[in-house]
Image (cartoon, rainbow, N blue to C red):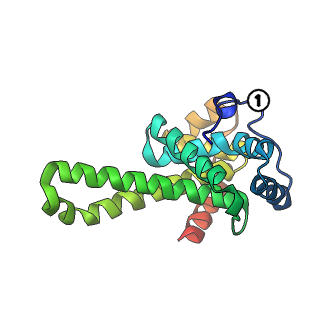
Amino acid sequence: MPLKASFANQSEDRWVDVNSDADERAWADRIRAGDIAAFETLYRTYWERLFAFAFRYVQLKEDAEEIVQEVFFRIWRGRAQWMPAGAVRNYLYLAVRNAARDRLERAAVARRLGRGGRVGQLATATEIQSDLEAADLVAAVQRALDELPPKRSAVCKLRLIDELSYAQIAERLGICEKTVETQLARGLKFLRERLHDAR
């Protein structure tokens, strides 16, 4: 069953509060039993976050949307046997990551074949792997930034992505430079730990 457009982009419910893994497990049980309302709730809760996660890999809005739609379509189509191991949210992120990596790899192979046939494809297998690893790293950093408290996340993004100075960040956020320094130090420590754990 294709996903209904009626709830595909609704944003008012997008941050449905999930209290625990048990709540998500209950959703999975209900989805397995064919409960479309539970499926819609899961979809609304994770659509925006999964779209943003997929976009970090593929960098195209349409591709990111298709990837998330495909993941949810596969869940609904195979709902009777859908038993995610571990947390449901982890299953969703992993499924989106794998679908995004597959799409990137297929696109890279198609580009290589278009330029040089089989020899070009074989010669650039290392490049394809390097592209995938870079996309993984970008997505991991972005996901870690999203886990930080809002102010700390804003400071880190302005410094690491926008490359603003401490003074510029302080002015933009209405805080003192010492706060910028403290928040950035804590944020970088968290990012280092997160990226080390992800290896």
Quarter location, residue 158? top right
Of residues 56 and 152, the one nearer the viewer is: 56
**In the picture, which quadrant includes the N terminus?**
top right
* Secondary element type, mark 1: loop
Of residues 41 and 123, the one nearer the viewer is: 41
- Work out whether residue 149 can be spotted: yes
Q: How many marks?
A: 1
Residue 161 percent across, percent down from the top left? 49, 43
Residue 164 percent across, percent down from the top left? 51, 38
Q: Which residue is mark 1?
A: 12
Q: Is residue 154 above or below residue 121?
A: above
Q: Is residue 94 above or below residue 65?
A: below
Of residues 44 and 34, the one nearer the viewer is: 34
**Left or right of residue 160, residue 29 in this image:** right
**Left or right of residue 86, residue 143 in this image:** left
At a point 61% along the width and 56% down the height, the residue shown is 93
Quarter location, residue 128? bottom left
Q: Is residue 161 above or below residue 31?
A: above
**Left or right of residue 144, residue 126 in this image:** left
Question: Badge 1: how crowded within 10 Å, few (<14), some, or many (20+)?
Answer: few
At a point 18% along the width and 48% down the height, the residue shown is 114
Residue 78 percent across, percent down from the top left? 64, 56
At a point 65% along the width and 46% down the height, the residue shown is 153
Residue 175 percent across, percent down from the top left? 70, 36
- Work out whether residue 178 can be spotted: no
Q: Amino acid at mark 1?
A: Glu
Of residues 188 and 141, the one nearer the viewer is: 141
At a point 57% along the width and 45% down the height, the residue shown is 68
